[in-house]
Image (cartoon, rainbow, N blue to C red):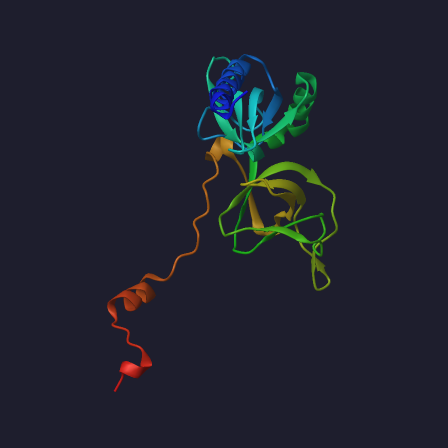
Amino acid sequence: MTRRRRRPAAALIAALLLISTLGSCARKFGWGVVLWSSSEAPLAAGTLVPVYIRSNIESLYVVGVPGSDKKVELPLWQVEVFASKKKAQARVEELGSNASLYLAATRDGLPVREEPNNLAKRVYRLREAESVKVLRKVEGEKVRTGDEALAGEWYEVLAEGGAIGYVFSNTMRLYDETKEGPPVAAVAPSLDSARVDIIFTRSWKPAYFQE
């Protein structure tokens, strides 16, 4: 085959692959459990969904909305996928009442740790008011300040973006999204407005221009 003929052949193969991919929407890739409620569709955490496509390039799943023909895209970190519906259903049951629970950091810099131990490696750092999704309550080492044990519980949690680890609830607020609404993204710290005014209204000159 000449080089001139190879190009149309390659285009045809690509088109056939695209048609095959679109047609695969009718077949399930697996079954998933929504771990973090979606603002893009009425999918609460703990919802069992059919999964049709996984895109590593876009880092998302295409999932079906139960009770309708609608399909939506969700980030990979937001869905836990299983090969069978039975296994996915077991995960839903495991989440139980934790499905709607979140923890919000009450101060900046709180750590999410690799193990439920205050000396364990930090895998994520929370901003003030940032929420994490509760996966389950776990047994962990007591957290002390001096000789006094602090009140609180260890939880396995999911941070927005996909980091999974453990937090101690002493300096966090536990809330139920069915009563308080979905988590609100934390706002990144900003410069004090007075300092910003000084920076942008004052004329700055290099040292060699000064008299």
Residue 152, image x and y in percent? 65, 48
Quarter that holds the N terminus: top right
Taking the spot 29% from the left edge, 68% from the top edge, the residue there is 198
| The quadrant where residue 35 appears | top right
Camera-side residue of 119 and 207: 207
Q: Is residue 1 above or below residue 158?
A: above
Left-right relation of 141 to 173: right
Residue 146, image x and y in percent? 70, 64
Q: Is residue 144 above or below residue 1?
A: below
Quarter that holds the C terminus: bottom left
Q: Is residue 116 above or below residue 61?
A: below
Taking the spot 55% from the left edge, 15% from the top edge, the residue there is 24
Left-right relation of 165 to 161: right
Taking the spot 44% from the left edge, 52% from the top edge, the residue there is 188
Exactly how many numbered labels are in the figure?
0
Residue 115, image x and y in percent? 71, 48
Residue 176, image x and y in percent? 53, 35
Residue lying farthest to the front in this orientation: 2
Camera-side residue of 2 and 191: 2
